[in-house]
Amino acid sequence: MTTAPRSDRSPLRIAVIGAGMSGLLSAIELERAGYRDVAIYEKAERLGGTWRENTYPGIACDVPSHFYSYSFAPNPDWSHRFAPGDEIQAYFEGVARRFGVDGRIRTGVEVTHCAFVDGRWRLALSDGTTDVADVVIAATGVLHHPRLPEIEGLDTFAGAAFHSARWDHSVPLDGRRVGVIGTGSTAIQITSALVDRVAHFSLFQRTAQWVAPMENPAYTDAEKAEFHRHPETIEAMRAEMARALTAGFANALVDADSPAIAAIQAACLANLENNVADPVLREKLRPTYRAACKRLIISPDFYAAIQHPDATLVTEGIERIEPRGVRTRDGRLHELDVLVLATGFRVDRFVRPMQVTGRDGVALDDVWKEGPYAYLAMCVPGFPNFFLLQGPNGPVGNFSLIDVGELEVAYVLQLVEKLRSGACDEVSVTHAAMQRFDAERREAAKRTIWATGCRSWYLDADGLPTAWPWTFDRFRAETAAPRLDDYELRRRERA
Ligand code: N01
C-alpha cells in the first residue's frame, strides 16, 4: 500500500474523525484558520456524538449550560441552568449550520483503518472507498461503547431490555414496571425522570453514591431577553462558572486532602442526612468511600425520587435475570416489564475499533495493550501528524469538556501550523517526553481523590486513576503552547 506524497504546493489535507462536540469544534477552527481541504467523517447519520446517542428520559448535562457551550457560540436561549439533552443536541446542530460545517460532514461513513504510509495517512472507509490525509484528528469520543453487564440469564428476559445509551423509544413506559441496573449519573437521572410515570420503579444498586444537591432552575423570559441584549452578561457568567468549577471542584479532585474536597463531602452528607427520612433507606444510600472518589452525582431530586411510594431501592446483589424479572441473592424475584442497563461504558476504547497503524507498521492496539495513554491526552509516539481529542489521561470528569476541547484544538493547530509553514513534514511526540509525562502522571494519580478506595471508570486495570491528575490550571498552562523539545519535527527527503 503506498500513498502519493503531497506536493510542496498543495494544501494540507486534514481528516477529522467524528462529528461530536470535539469534531465539530475541529472543523470550525480549521476553517477559521484557513484550512480548506478538510474531510469530516461521522459513522452515524447525524452529528452530535454523546448527545445524539444518549436519549434516555431525564438526560441533561451536569455542567451548567452557559459553560457547556463553545466560547465563540454563546446561547442566550438555554432553557435551564442544566439544559436537557435534546436542547444540547439542537445547539450542536445549530452551531454546525451557523458555521457552515453541517453540509461538509460525511455522515454514515466510518473510518475503519488509518495507516501511516510513505508520510501520509491512508484511511479505509466503511463504504469501501479510501482517502489520504496529511493530518488526522481523531475526535472519536470517550464514553461511546456501552458496557453490558455479565449477568446470567440476561438474554432470557421476556420484556424489553436495552442499554441506557441505546434507548428504545418504541417501548412504552407509562404504567409499567421498570427496573434500572446501575447508580451512575445516567441511572440517577433516569430514576428522577421515571418514578412518577411508571407503575413501579426498581433501582438495582451495587454501590451507593454520594449525591451533591444542585437545583436546576429554568431561565425566565426576562433573563433570556437580557442575555440577548447584553451578551457580555453571559461572558461574565461563564467566567464566574469557570472560576467556581476550577477552584471548588476540578482542582480539588486532584488533592484528596484539600479543604474543597472536605466541603463537597460535607454538602453531600448533609444532603443524605436531611433529605432521606427512613433510617433504613438512608443507611442503604450511605456510601462507604469518600465523596467524589467515583464521579460525583449532581441531582436536586434523586433522594425525593427514590422515596416515591412506587420506587424500590434494591441493594441485594443480582443472582440472575429470568424471563419475568431480576432474581436477587435473597431469592426474591423483582418482576419487570422493562429492564434498563445503565451500566456504563467501555472507557478504554477511544478510537477503537478503528485500526490505527503508525510509523513502521506499529499498531496502536499493540502500543496500548497494557492500557491506552497519550501525551497531554493528544499525542502518541510513533504516530506522526495524528492527534487525539479527549484522548487518554485527559481531564475528563473534572470540567467542561468543551473547554478541554477548545484548549486541545488550539494546541493541535499550533503543531499543524509547523506542517503548513513547511517547518517539517512530520510531527510526533518523542518517546522520552511520553515516558516522562506518564511517570509523572502515575505518581500524581496516587494523590487524587479517585485513588482513595472505590471502584470507578476512572481506574485502569491496575486500579490507578487514568484521568489528568493535576489541576485544570496546569492543563490550561501546558496546552497553551507545545514544548517543541518534546516533539520530533522530521523533514522528508525531497527528490
Ligand atoms: O455509567 P457509570 P453512567 N451489576 O459507569 C453499575 C457521564 N455522564 O452511564 O458503581 C450491577 O458511571 C455500576 O456499579 P458500581 C459521566 O462522566 C454524565 O452512569 O461499579 N451493577 C454503576 O453504578 C459519568 O460518570 C451525565 O458498583 C453494575 C453503573 O452500573 C459517565 O458518563 C449523565 C454492573 C455504571 O455507572 C458514565 O455514567 C450521564 C453489574 N454487573 C453520564 N455493571 C451528566 O452530565 C455496572 N454496574 C449528568
Image: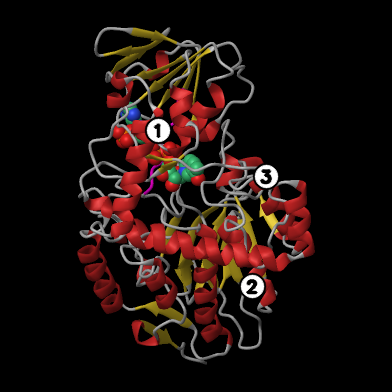
Mark 3 residue's CB less than 8 Å from ligand 1:
no
The residue that mark 2 highlights is: 30
Task: Name the image quarter holding residue 396.
Answer: bottom left
Q: Amino acid at mark 2?
A: Leu
Residue at image location 23% in from the left, 70% down from the top: 440
At which x and y percent is residue 25?
61, 64
Q: Tell me, yes or no, if residue 395 can be seen here.
A: no
Element on which disc 2 rests: helix
Element on which disc 1 rests: loop
Q: Report the Cα–Cα distance between label 1 and label 3.
A: 24 Å
Ligand 1, seen in the image, is in the quarter at top left
The residue that mark 3 highlights is: 87
Q: Nearer the viewer, residue 324 or 495?
A: 324
Q: Tell me, yes or no, if residue 43 can be seen here.
A: yes
At which x and y percent is residue 338?
50, 16
At which x and y percent is residue 351?
45, 55
The residue that mark 1 highlights is: 343
> Which mark lies nearer to you, 3 or 2?
3
At which x and y percent is residue 83?
62, 45
Q: Earlier in the sequence, mark 1 or mark 2?
A: 2
Q: Determine whether label 3 and label 2 are within 8 Å by CB.
A: no
Q: Earlier in the sequence, mark 3 or mark 2?
A: 2
| 286 left or right of 391 in image | left
> Which mark lies nearer to you, 1 or 3?
3
The main secondary structure of the magenta stretch is loop
Mark 1 residue's CB less than 8 Å from ligand 1:
yes
Which residue is the extreme one toward the front? 274
Task: Name the image quarter holding residue 131.
Answer: bottom right
